Amino acid sequence: EDKPNLLQHVRFQSWNFENILTWESGPDSTQDTVYSVEYKVYGKKPWLAKEGCQQITRQSCNLTAETSNLTELYYYAQVTATSPGGQTTKKRSTRFNLLQDTAIKQPDVTCVPKVSSVQVVIHPTFTPIRGQDGRPQTLQDIFQDLLYRLQLQVNHTYAMHLEGKQKEYEFFGLTPDTEFLGNVVIFIPNWYKKSAPYVCRVKTLPDRTWTYS
Amino acid sequence: KTLRLGSCVISTNLQKIQSTFSEIRDSVQAEDRNIDTRILSKSLSLQDTEPSDQCCLLRRVLRLYLERVFKNYQTSDPHTLRKISSLANSFLTILKDLRLCHDRKTCHCGEEAAEKYGQILSHFEELAPQAAVVKTLGELDIFLQWLEETS
Amino acid sequence: DGVAVLPAPQNLSVHSTNMKHILTWSPVVVPGQTIYYSVQYQGEYESLYLSHMWIPSHWDSPIAKPECDVTDDITATVWYNFRVSATLGSQTSAWSILEHPFNRNSTVLTPPKTEVTKDGSHMVIELEDLGPHLEFNVVYWRSEPDAEERSKLIKNGGISVHLQTMEPGAKYCAKAQTLVKAIERRSAFSRVECVEVEGEALPL
């Protein structure tokens, strides 16, 4: 009897450790096909049913809480699709590596224009992961080598570059009353991770100081 | 990247190795049928090993990869073959650097290194040969994570 | 049956500059015919543990020219062997092997071409783009006695980078060198270039 294909592309999609399992319906599935999700730690036996994702009709399941242990970094998930007639298809994700497979969202940044400079303040990015003290961990807590790369495009020919681990930066020596394009990226060298850029368009303030000759 | 293994200090390009492995990771791990067990178990990790024994443990695991994993992994795909060659030659570079530490007597093999490597080897040999090769190759990201945390 | 009638390519050698490695050989000439070549390589690992194994260069399809960019085949700082064979229709030559194995740490590193300019009071440098494997160390200073040298690591060439904001009436200079972390080597410095900001030096 031909096995129905009710399900395909089971995979983890992860941003800043927010781990969502997604899948797509298969050629043989219908509106009434239901899905049940299980997960497990690689190297350990039991598959565990994910509460809240049993017999569901939607095609995603938030596994963040179940897959956020920094000492158990490698996970699998699998989805069983069941048709109204009771036929099933079971498909497994690839091995999910918590540190390697999470993508980094753009940073939370405030650009502050002044007369001849632009100040850039980067706010910490919290993750769902908790430390041993129960406190939510920031990306910087987790990735020790995390650094910020800032660029201010001065005009069409060149840009100013700053880089570091601190949260506050300032581009000096700018022309008053002029527009600049700022760009801030989170970079994690060890894991070859680079966030989407935060972009801010700012204009330095007019210079109202009176010069007495 | 600088790896500090007790008094043995070497530098290596973990990023490059990491990005090379990521190109074949999913296909290699998909060949691993037995996901209930793990060869490089957490309790045997390099970073939780006495610093004075880290160099020796690393040397032995590198040799396991060079002599029994890369050598016996079977693939007809040229792309995979090239990536395996790149990984193997990068591991060989690290092993050659560690040999310098061994020559300078900074790569001592103590009880902990022998005990941990013994367990890794017994996990490896419990499996059928080709299954062991595929699983150990699939766990290369675990091994790189160990190196990452040792740096 | 494709017996090796065709002569094997000769004079294989690798020319490497700034981490770009080109394998060349003397062409096999058959008047009026196009000869194709296949390139394979073996890293030090293969020669030690799998000596029978040769790996097709990433240029899978046969090559018509007597040269091949093997940069992407050489991914570790170990010795590499190369071999080339010629093909004409169903005829295939024997393999010809590189006489001396190649190691990328012997690549020739040249200082980058630089252009130091100013935009108002800003000192700007543009560096030659020498490919993805190279970074640049730029050293810059204010041209005065006991000047303090500052340096900046620039990840890639081909873009203009701001070095510092300058004071009127002073001269500022810069030079650059190529860096390759993978082989832990650097080039000589480029020639020094200076720019000056008009106007009088500010009163102290």
Image: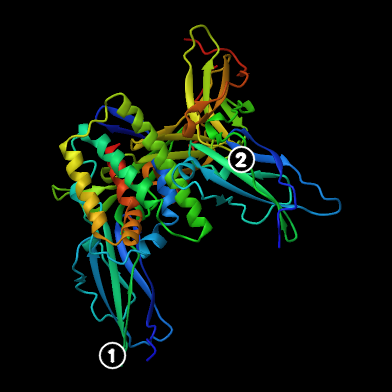
Look at the image and tell me whether residue B12 can be seen: no
Camera-near label (2 vs 1) is 1
Which quarter of the figure is the N terminus of chain B placed in? top left
Residue type at mark 1: give it. Answer: Gly
Residue closest to the eye, A212 or C32:
C32
Badge number at residue A156: 2
Q: Quadrant of the C terminus of chain B?
A: top left
**Residue at the image position 69 percent from the left and 40 percent from the top:** C24
**Local crowd size for mark 1, using a 10 Å CA cut-off: few (<14), some (14–19), many (≥20):** few
Residue sitting at x 75%, y 53%: C5
Task: Name the residue carrying label 1.
Answer: A86
Measured as percent of width and height from the top left, residue C200 is found at 58, 13
Residue A115 coordinates in the image, percent (x, y): 47, 33
Residue A181 placement (x, y as % from top left)? 51, 43
What subunit carries mark 2?
A
Please say if B11 is above or below C82.
above
Whether labels 2 and 1 share one chain: yes
Badge 1 marks a residue whose secondary structure is loop
- Residue A112: x and y in percent read 41, 40
